Image (cartoon, rainbow, N blue to C red):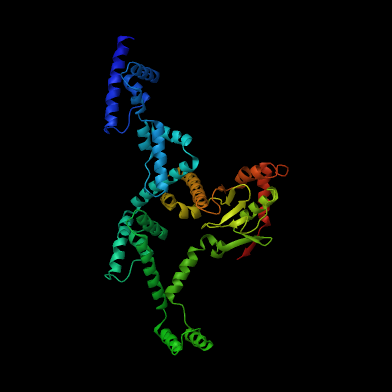
Amino acid sequence: MPQRDILKYETFTGAFREELAAFQAGLLGRTSTDKEWARALSISKNTVRRYLSRAVSEGVISEEDLTKRTKRSEVIEELVQEIQAHQNREISTLKGNEYYAQRAGVKSGNFSSIIRNKLPRPLLDYRATQLRKQTAQRRWQEYHPDLGEVIESVPEEIQRCKQGLIKKLRTNPELAQLAGVKGLGTVSRELKRLVDQGKLTQVDRDYREDQIRTDANLNRHQTNSPETRRKLSEALKGREIGPVTEETRKRISEALTGRQVSEDTREKMREIWAKNNRGGVIWELSQQRYEHEGVYYASKTECATALALEKYIPGYKIVKGETFQVQGDTNCWFDFLLPGTGKIIEWHPTDIRHDGKRLLPFDFWALQEDEQTSKQNEKALIYRRRVLKADLAAEYWMQRQEAVNNSQVYGGNEVIHVRTPGELYDLIISEYGDPEKIPIRSDFVKEFEQLTKEAKPVKK
């Protein structure tokens, strides 16, 4: 070996042992990779590996020392354990790619490629969604710095109410107004976060809701005018405990005759009407249902899905409660159950506005604010909408699959989330349909559009 190579070899082995000793003593977070050693000594990775082999053969470094180096597989295992701990609510936040990339000795972008190939898809989707939630929540708190302070004061307020120091608790609308936020759901989610972090017990949260509900009921009953309350009192005088008699009903009816809705109530009704009729869409249309041969569906496309399954899946028949709209022992209603396949089909085209508020509110409202304030160009907003839509689909699937996994009735089944006619064909029809009847994909998509016309609109 040339003198120059001997010097590099001796330099490498000495530095390698020093680094390993510091790593074992806890002074370093990880050991250097072969690539980093090669860059530091201006040699190739293969040369580094030859140096290691020679050091082992000469007894300068032991085989055991090599096993103590940070392995990429160990970093991946650490990441999997962190995700599982988060799913079990043992931890509240996840570390980003930068942390694990540094541990593995690679760039952040390279680490993203590594975990895409190493992690199961559900874990990968879960982690990506949760990291986006964390980022959106941080941004939300930056937009509304007073929100955290207002919410953090709730536990103390509850204790003061229990001790009789205050008579009334602030409602969610009052907290939202104080913090300067519009969505009431934000307050509820922040209160849930306090429960998850152990800063607010579920018992105290339930106590708060009961108190607010009681106060609201008292206020509602006190809205009658003194004259109406007097008439009602007289109507109920002498009434015995038991069912209301016809005479009492008559007196109460007479007492309430001519009573007018207050102007304040009328104004609230006008605001609700205006809010729910933006763009000329009447609120009642949201209650629209569709019917086909005595079976009711939530949408035309859900009806078309049912008809396509009956037509192409051998032996499949829509029976509510058995193969359609099944619940079992879960809190969810599942759209379609394919007997004998272990598959549950959820027809749910992703809607950013509807699903965003419910599934990923922080991401949704952060996007909404950027759209309204034009903080990003249109191309960036289009990309963010596409990413959010994918995240919403993953979140919806995870919630449904989790419900199935925890079910004694449907445990072991796989939830297949279908969003488009094309996905229905690719994931279900082509897989489980009768090969002699199945059309080509493009024809099926056209046929699906025609099947939507079979659904007849009704009001339920």
The structure residue drawn at horizontal position 27% and vertical position 20%, both measured from the top left corner, is 14
Identity of the residue furthest to the top in this view: 2
Left-right relation of 424 to 240:
right
Q: Quadrant of residue 21?
A: top left
Q: Nearer the viewer, residue 93 or 66?
A: 66
Percent x, y of residue 140: 37, 51
Q: Is the N terminus in the top left, top right, bottom left or bottom right quadrant?
A: top left
Total marks placed: 0
x and y percentages locating residue 251 in the rendered image: 49, 88
Q: Quadrant of residue 8?
A: top left
Residue furthest out toward the bottom: 238
Q: Residue 68 versus residue 176: which sits nearer the camera?
A: 68
240 on left or right of 201: right
- Figure check: 113 above or below 281: above
- Judge whether residue 375 can be spotted in this image: no
Where is 60 relative to 141, above or below?
Answer: above
Determine if residue 195 is in view: yes
Give coordinates of residue 255: x percent, y percent. 47, 86
Q: Which corner quadrant of the image does residue 182 belong to? A: bottom left
User: Viewer-proximal residue, 283 or 233?
Assistant: 233
| Residue 156 in the figure: left or right of residue 75 | left
| Residue 245 in the image, given as x and y percentages of width and height | 52, 86
Which residue sits at x=64%, y=61%?
Answer: 457
The C terminus lies in which quarter of the figure? bottom right
